Structure formats: C-alpha cells, structure tokens
Image: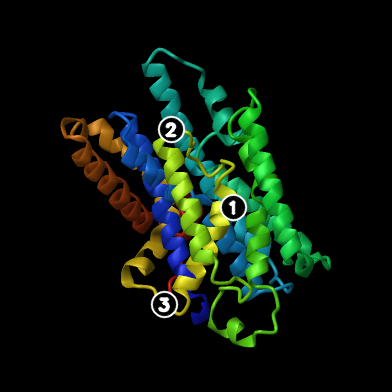
C-alpha cells in the first residue's frame, strides 16, 4: 500500500475496535444494568461498520481505478461469501441449540433460513459489501464511476441514507432477519464518499500526501464538536438510539471521517494499529462466538461489571486472533473462516 494511504490502516483499526466495542457493550448490558457511560460509548462505536465500506471503495479506486484485473469479483467474493456461510452456520446452529434449551424450539431449518437467507446476524455486512463490489465492477464497465465522485452526488446520497433509515424508524413491520439492512439505499453514501475523496483535483500535492480533500475548510472541527455535543445530550436524555442504521449516523460519520482524514494525514501507523489490521477480519467475524464461550464457562458472571467486561473482552479478542492463526495455515480454511490482511 502506498504511504499516502496510511490513513487506511488507522481507519481499519478503528472500525475493528468500534464493532468489537459495540457488541461488547451490548453483551455487558445483557447481564448488568444499563449505564449512561456505556450508552455514550456506543456513539463512536456505531460508526464502525460504515468505515469498512468506505475503505473498500477507496482502495479499489486507488489501486485499480477503472481498470480492474481479471478475476476481480471471483477472488473477492469467495473471501466474503465463504465466511458468511461458515460462520452463519455456526451462529445459527448455536442459536437453535440455545432456543431449544430454553424451550423455544423454532426448528433448525427455520433458524438456518433466518441467518443465511435473511442475513439475521452481524455477518449481514458481508452480503452488503459483496453488493458494492459488484456495483464497483459494473460501474467500471460504464462512464459513471467518475460522475459518482462529485459533491452534489455525495449530498444526494447522504439525503437518501437519512431518508431511508428514517423510513424504517417509523415503520412498525420490518422484513425478516436483516433484509432491510443489506439493501444498498442506506449505505450508498459511503460508496460515493470513497469515490469523492479520490476524485481528480488540481491540487496534485494532495494526491501525493493523503486522502483529506482540500475543499474541506476550518469549519470542520467546530461542526464535529457541535454535532458530538448534541448526540451526547440526546444520549443523556434517553432520546438517542444506537446502531449504524440510525438517522444520525450518516451525517455524523461524514463529519467524523473528514476530520479523521485531516488529523491522520501523514501519520505512520503504529505497531498496534498494524496488528489490528492483520486480524481485523477475524476479530469482526469471531468475537461474539468467543463472548458466548466465555459466558459458558460461568467464570465472568462471578465478577463485577468491569471485571466481566475485561474478561469477556479479552477472551473475545484473543480467541479471534488464535482462530485466525489456526485457519490461515491453509488456503481453504482461510477462505472459510477469514483471511488475514496483508500488512506491509
């Protein structure tokens, strides 16, 4: 990876930790009373999933532009759909056994359908990412790819995302599983944002030094701070819902990302950041499984909330890393259970 994209290392590490933290907070509050500090921690953690779509588009547009290599789709989709099926079967079977043990037997086949066909688990992101890979490939066959990187298209896609998630806020009935989460309308702004920051510009120095667009002015830190204070205030009053699929996430993500790109420009990734990059995919996929295994031992429940959080969190992180080392010894198992990122 070119050094001018060092920001990507930081963003991927952040996305990995944000998703991990979001699920850990949810897991803690399943066993202990809710706490306002944990709720506020969910605000930045809700931005984790969008980061990965943005990263993918930036890397594609930087490495390939409109000239994709042969086998582009086949190679990438197999490393997304393989883990989707493998972990989907693991999580759905575990959920079936849990429900059966509690006397609520929905049936193994029905549970498989909910998880694998309707994407009813956190692996829905893999199906979402697959759609954007296909979209990128399709756009390289047309002349629309550069057009999508324009500012007015970004603003329109941002408005579409806000409207889409607002719609599901008011609708009582939702499709089964997470079907409405994997439709692209609420995420298209991330695809456009990735193209926008890599759009051609007369500022050739910016193309050499980083991703931060030169058009973003000094107003950005103040705007981000005001938006953050509003979100914290809503959280304190109990008026904020936490998820990457909420109305407030799209505009706040754009503000946060643009500010992060300015702050990270030229900053070399640390050893910890590179380490997180290497294992990010496995951590994303496997950490809830190891949370559940930690609970099954019975030990964490004997601890206070902070001890529970540290124990379960460490178990989830270490377990995912060890699993990654094990499955990446063979190509077929890496394809099924999560390939490690190549970190230069």
Residue at figure coordinates x 19%, y 40% from the top left? 307
Mark 2 to mark 3: distance in Å?
37 Å
Q: Earlier in the sequence, mark 2 or mark 3?
A: 2
Residue at figure coordinates x 62%, y 64% from the top left? 57
- How dense is the environment of label 1, judged by Cα within 10 Å: few (below 14), some, or many (20 and up)? some
Residue 35 seen in the current view: yes
- Vertical placement of residue 281 versus 202, above or below: above
Q: Quadrant of residue 85?
A: top right
Q: Judging from the image, what secondary structure is the residue with disc 2 in? A: loop
Camera-nearest label, 1 or 3: 1
Q: Judging from the image, what secondary structure is the residue with disc 3 in? A: loop
Residue at figure coordinates x 56%, y 23% from the top left? 110
Mark 1 to mark 2: distance in Å?
20 Å
Residue at figure coordinates x 42%, y 34% from the top left? 237
Residues tagged 1 and 3 counted as in contact (Cβ below 8 A):
no
Q: Which residue, as the protein is rendered here, is positioned at the far bottom?
A: 205
Along the viewing direction, whichever of 179 and 105 lies nearer the viewer: 179
Q: Quadrant of the C terminus?
A: bottom left
**Could you tell whether 280 is left or right of 317 in the image?**
right
Label 1, on which residue? 251
Q: Earlier in the sequence, mark 1 or mark 2?
A: 2
Camera-nearest label, 2 or 3: 2
Label 2, on which residue? 238
Mark 1 to mark 3: distance in Å?
25 Å
**Could you tell whether 333 is left or right of 291 in the image?**
right
- Vertical placement of residue 98 versus 214, above or below: above
- Vertical placement of residue 100 versus 212, above or below: above
Label 3, on which residue? 267
Question: Could you say where residue 99 lies in the image, as x and y percent from the top left?
Answer: 42, 20
């Amino acid at each position: 990876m070119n050094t001018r994209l060092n920001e990507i290392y930081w963003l991927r590490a952040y996305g990995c930790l944000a998703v991990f933290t979001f699920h850990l907070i949810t897991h803690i509050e399943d066993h202990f009373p809710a706490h306002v500090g944990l709720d506020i921690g969910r605000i930045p953690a809700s931005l984790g999933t969008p980061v990965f779509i943005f990263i993918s588009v930036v890397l594609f547009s930087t490495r390939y532009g409109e000239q994709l290599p042969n086998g582009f789709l086949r190679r990438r989709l197999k490393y997304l759909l393989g883990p989707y099926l493998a972990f989907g079967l693991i999580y759905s079977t575990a959920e079936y056994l849990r429900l059966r043990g509690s006397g609520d037997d929905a049936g193994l086949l029905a549970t498989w359908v909910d998880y694998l066909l309707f994407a009813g688990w956190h692996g829905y992101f893999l199906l979402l990412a697959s759609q954007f890979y296909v979209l990128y490939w399709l756009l390289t066959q047309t002349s629309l790819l550069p057009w999508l990187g324009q500012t007015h298209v970004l603003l329109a896609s941002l408005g579409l995302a806000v409207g889409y998630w607002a719609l599901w806020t008011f609708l009582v009935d939702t499709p089964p599983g997470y079907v409405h989460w994997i439709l692209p309308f609420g995420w298209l702004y991330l695809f456009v944002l990735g193209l926008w920051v890599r759009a051609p510009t007369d500022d050739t120095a910016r193309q050499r030094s980083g991703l931060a667009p030169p058009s973003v002015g000094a107003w950005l830190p103040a705007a981000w701070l005001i938006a953050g204070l509003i979100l914290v205030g809503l959280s304190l009053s109990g008026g904020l819902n936490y998820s990457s699929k909420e109305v407030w996430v799209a505009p706040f993500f754009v503000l946060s990302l643009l500010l992060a790109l300015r702050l990270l420009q030229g900053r070399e990734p640390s050893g910890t950041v590179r380490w997180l990059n290497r294992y990010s995919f496995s951590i994303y996929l496997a950490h809830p499984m190891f949370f559940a295994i930690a609970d099954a031992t019975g030990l964490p429940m004997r601890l206070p909330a902070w001890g529970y959080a540290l124990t379960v969190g460490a178990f989830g992180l270490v377990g995912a890393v060890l699993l990654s080392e094990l499955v990446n010894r063979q190509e077929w198992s890496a394809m099924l259970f999560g390939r490690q990122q190549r970190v230069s």
